[in-house]
């Protein structure tokens, strides 16, 4: 008993000692808190007070401000801050906000110190309580593990150890599942970003206009870099109709593509103008059919009954010999179904039918070092000049004008006489010509009014040439907002009927500003195709502009080079380009939103609209018939401002059968380092030295061959020797030629337009378009200087079938200068800026060089003013070899 009492006294003494210790700690905490508050008051007398920008009565939402270098939300700490002479602040919570608002009105310093100490004591009490509860839980779990269930559970008298373990495990797993479900429910309750459809983004920007769409900061930075968060808050991309999320990019009909509604009276005027323009060609077709029917009547001895050639609407009837599309009358073999157009029938009767045999266009790969000015690797080279000329086919008509089927060796049967067949109803063309004549007689005011319009103002013209004594040095160049009236259509027709190009500025300003970045288009493509097609799109076939041949490259690497550039090991820029990507016949299906955006940007939609252009003949095809591929087509290519002379990112000289309009939708500038620029200048000198060396060798070969023929007069020898000596001096003038190559002509502008220095950052492509009347002189120049040009594998051009249709020439600034000196002709030369639409008339040869990485979208159309050029070019393409690259899609 004594021992128990002494133990109790000793325990009570220890308790008194602990109480005294706690009191000393409390006093120290009070003094520490008091000193800390006084220190805070002293250090923050001159501090600033954070306040939330909106008041309690403000109902509008405002964006939280963020630092420029961080994308994470900054949480403000509840520090005591105040300004001079306003007393000590007191914390309170805004009812409508989780931010701490500082109140400067209020209590004295002692009251604040007392409240601070009370808050510290309460915080320590809560900490002790939580620690005590944690100790009790751990103690209970320990007793449960040891089998002491009597004190742990009042309602259970006995239980097995395994059931206790299961109880603990089930409770723990239940709590884990509950916490996981609560966390998942909290995440799912968050609103989703409309762009990426993710709801784990912590910082999002809601739209004030629609109040339903939000965009996360990550998507804004990646896919809408030109827009600020404030602009998206005022009106989100979905409300602006330029959202480039996958769902919106795969939707069509979101925007109105037509710019102006045409009245009924305007439609009547347009259709009469169309009929009047087409009447001469209807008469020509009708005359050819009448002549063929007369020949058929003489063969049969009576009025012929022409059988119909049945074909499906999804089939295109074409001539087996020249591949030209057949519209109506033609001749067909009843045995082998060999079909022949009326033009070939006419040539057979005249004995002028060409075989159009396939030709070998062979260029030998002489190694990478040769393409950069080095020596070629040894190879067996077959001279293209030894392949022989195409022979004339011995296919003659019978005395009565009938034509037998082609021989078997020429894909015919050679047994039967070709029968005259038709596709359209009998007399359809002649009836159409009669109706057209009747309609044209009612109205002739349209053409007169079009020609009597006043000249366009000088602010709508752009200087593009400097021909002496010519009135067409300026091109019609209005702004998009200035051509919405009917009068401007007449101005367009006035220049268009003369075969002049037209430039329309700011075509993209009237659109919704949908992104034309290649990565946006590629992302839309990958989401809109099946898995197999998506896998095939991981690589693309690009054209290497130095070797003029296709190379396979990763799609990501290609687009990375679009913005960052690519180079060879010797620092020479590597220029790649994608032509017609994605395939134009699938453009509307794969990129429907971009297709609508492009059509809405087209100027003069009476001509250019591929769906509803009232003056676009390509729209007039019956809906159930197979139509030619008119686009849109996308061209994505690298580019550089400096003219390289070899391996430039160019579209070589060519001529389209139909009219076209080309819009520059996006550019990216790639800067060249000083080291790369130095290497380029050194390689240019090697290129010029290689050119002069091969030119000298070719001159010696020509000189030797002429001497063998015995046709060398003394005067020619002197001239030849002087020419060789002059050529040998050329390498010393390489530096002078390099300086001339920098002085490339650029399209000047009038005072009413921005100067070149102000718009260099907007310029993307350099265009050269030749006049139709200069084509013959241009062809003569190209044939004369063909060896000075390089094509596939940088080999000299030694074979020319057609100087323009071969598409193997690009005239550099030096060649354009020589062309004007020797033949007195020059092209329209101008720079295309972002958002500008260039109209190219059919029959005008043109070439393009990219000054930056460019994305261009083009579409073809057929205007009534240029139908004659389309027919003329059809005759030219018919004479090309069967395997000529220009014949693939030109004769549809």
Image: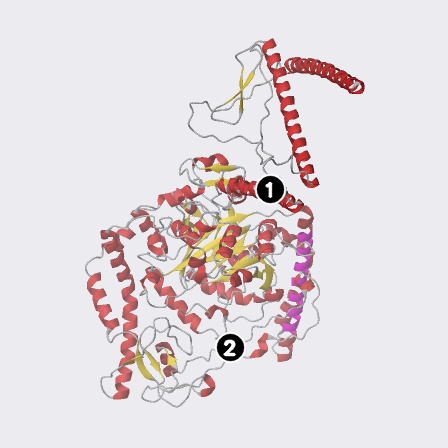
Provide the secondary structure element on which disc 1 rests: helix
Residue for badge 1: 171
Q: Could you say which is closer to the camera, residue 667 or residue 177?
A: 177
Give the x, y percent position of residue 279. 27, 65
Rendered-image quadrant of the N terminus: top right
Q: Which residues are magenta?
A: 679-703
Q: CA distance from mark 2 to mark 1?
A: 84 Å
State the predominant SS element of the stretch in magenta: helix
> Magenta includes 688?
yes
Provide the secondary structure element on which disc 2 rests: loop
Does the image show residue 226?
no
Residue for badge 2: 358
568 vs 542, left or right, is right
252 vs 724, left or right, is left
Q: Could you say which is closer to the camera, residue 468 or residue 814?
A: 814
Please report the residue visible at 56 percent of the width from the left and 71 percent of the height from the top: 799
């Amino acid at each position: 008993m004594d021992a128990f009492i002494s133990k109790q006294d000793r325990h009570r003494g220890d308790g008194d000692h602990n109480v005294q210790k706690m009191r000393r700690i409390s006093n120290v905490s009070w003094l520490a808190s008091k000193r800390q508050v006084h220190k805070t008051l002293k250090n923050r007398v001159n501090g600033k007070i954070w306040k939330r920008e909106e008041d309690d009565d403000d109902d509008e939402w405002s964006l939280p401000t963020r630092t420029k270098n961080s994308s994470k939300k900054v949480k403000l700490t509840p520090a005591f801050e105040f300004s001079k002479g306003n007393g000590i602040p007191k914390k309170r919570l805004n009812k409508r906000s989780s931010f701490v608002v500082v109140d400067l009105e209020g209590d004295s310093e002692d009251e604040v110190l007392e409240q601070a100490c009370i808050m510290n004591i309460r915080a320590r009490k809560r900490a002790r309580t939580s620690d005590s509860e944690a100790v009790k839980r751990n103690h209970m779990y320990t007793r449960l593990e040891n089998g002491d269930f009597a004190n742990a559970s009042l309602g259970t008298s006995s239980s097995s150890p395994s059931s206790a373990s299961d109880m603990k495990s089930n409770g723990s797993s239940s709590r884990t599942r509950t916490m996981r479900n609560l966390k998942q429910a909290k995440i799912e309750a968050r609103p989703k970003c409309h762009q990426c459809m993710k709801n784990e983004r912590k910082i999002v920007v809601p739209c004030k206009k629609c109040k339903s769409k939000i965009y996360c900061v990550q998507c804004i930075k990646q896919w809408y870099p030109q827009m600020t968060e404030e602009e998206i808050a005022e009106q989100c991309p979905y409300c602006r109709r330029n959202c480039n999320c996958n769902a919106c990019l795969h939707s069509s009909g979101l925007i109105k593509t037509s710019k102006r509604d045409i009245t009924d009276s305007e439609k009547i005027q347009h259709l009469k103008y169309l009929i009047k323009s087409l009447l001469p060609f209807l008469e020509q077709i009708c005359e050819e059919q009448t002549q063929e029917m007369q020949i058929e009547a003489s063969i049969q001895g009576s009025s012929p009954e022409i059988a119909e050639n049945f074909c499906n609407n999804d089939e295109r009837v074409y001539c087996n010999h020249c591949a030209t599309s057949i519209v109506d009358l033609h001749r067909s073999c009843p045995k082998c179904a060999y079909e022949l157009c009326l033009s070939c029938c006419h040539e057979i009767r005249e004995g002028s039918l060409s075989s159009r045999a396939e030709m070998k266009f062979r260029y030998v790969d002489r190694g990478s070092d040769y393409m950069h000015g080095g020596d070629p690797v040894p190879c067996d080279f077959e001279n293209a000049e030894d392949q022989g000329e195409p022979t004339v086919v011995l296919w003659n008509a019978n005395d009565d004008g009938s034509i037998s089927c082609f021989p078997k060796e020429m894909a015919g049967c050679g047994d039967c006489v070709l029968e005259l067949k038709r596709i359209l109803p009998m007399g359809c063309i002649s009836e159409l010509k009669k109706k057209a004549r009747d309609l044209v007689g009612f109205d002739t005011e349209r053409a007169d009014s079009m020609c009597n319009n006043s000249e366009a103002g000088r602010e709508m013209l752009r200087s593009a040439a400097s021909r002496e004594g010519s009135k067409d040095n300026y091109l019609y160049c209005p702004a998009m907002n200035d051509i919405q009236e009917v009068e401007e259509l007449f101005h367009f027709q006035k220049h268009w009927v003369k075969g002049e190009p037209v430039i329309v500025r700011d075509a993209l300003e009237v659109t919704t500003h949908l992104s034309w970045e290649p990565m946006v288009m590629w992302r839309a493509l990958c989401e809109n195709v099946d898995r197999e097609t998506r896998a095939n799109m991981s690589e693309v076939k690009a054209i290497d502009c130095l070797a003029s041949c296709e190379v396979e490259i990763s799609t990501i690497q290609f687009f990375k080079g679009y913005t960052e550039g690519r180079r060879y090991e010797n620092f020479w820029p590597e220029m790649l380009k994608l032509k017609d990507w994605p395939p134009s016949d699938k453009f509307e299906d794969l990129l429907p939103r971009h297709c609508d955006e492009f059509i809405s940007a087209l100027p003069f939609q009476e001509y250019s609209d591929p769906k509803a252009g009232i003056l676009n003949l390509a729209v007039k095809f019956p809906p159930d018939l197979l139509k030619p591929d008119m686009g849109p087509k996308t061209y994505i290519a690298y580019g550089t401002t400096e003219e390289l002379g070899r391996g430039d990112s160019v579209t070589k000289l060519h001529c389209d059968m139909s009219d076209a309009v080309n819009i520059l939708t996006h550019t990216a500038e790639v800067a060249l380092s000083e080291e790369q620029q130095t290497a380029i200048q050194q390689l240019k000198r090697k290129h010029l030295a290689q050119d002069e060396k091969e030119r000298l060798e070719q001159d010696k070969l020509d000189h030797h061959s002429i001497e063998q023929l015995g046709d060398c007069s003394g005067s020619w020898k002197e001239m030849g020797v002087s020419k060789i000596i002059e050529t040998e001096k050329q390498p010393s003038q390489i530096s002078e030629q390099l300086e001339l190559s920098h002085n490339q002509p650029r399209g000047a502008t009038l005072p009413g337009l921005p100067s070149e220095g102000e718009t260099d950052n907007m310029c993307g492509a350099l265009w050269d378009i030749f006049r139709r009347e200069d084509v013959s002189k241009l062809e003569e120049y190209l044939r004369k200087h063909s060896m000075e040009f390089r094509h596939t594998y940088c080999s000299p051009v030694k074979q020319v079938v057609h100087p323009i249709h071969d598409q193997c020439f690009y005239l550099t600034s030096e060649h354009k200068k020589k062309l004007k000196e020797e033949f007195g002709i020059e092209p329209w030369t101008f720079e295309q800026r972002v958002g500008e639409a260039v109209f190219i008339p059919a029959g005008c040869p043109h070439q393009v060089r990219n000054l930056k990485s460019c994305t261009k979208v083009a579409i073809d159309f057929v205007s009534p003013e240029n139908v004659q050029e389309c027919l003329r070019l059809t005759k030219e393409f018919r004479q090309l070899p069967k395997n000529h690259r220009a014949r693939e899609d030109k004769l549809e």
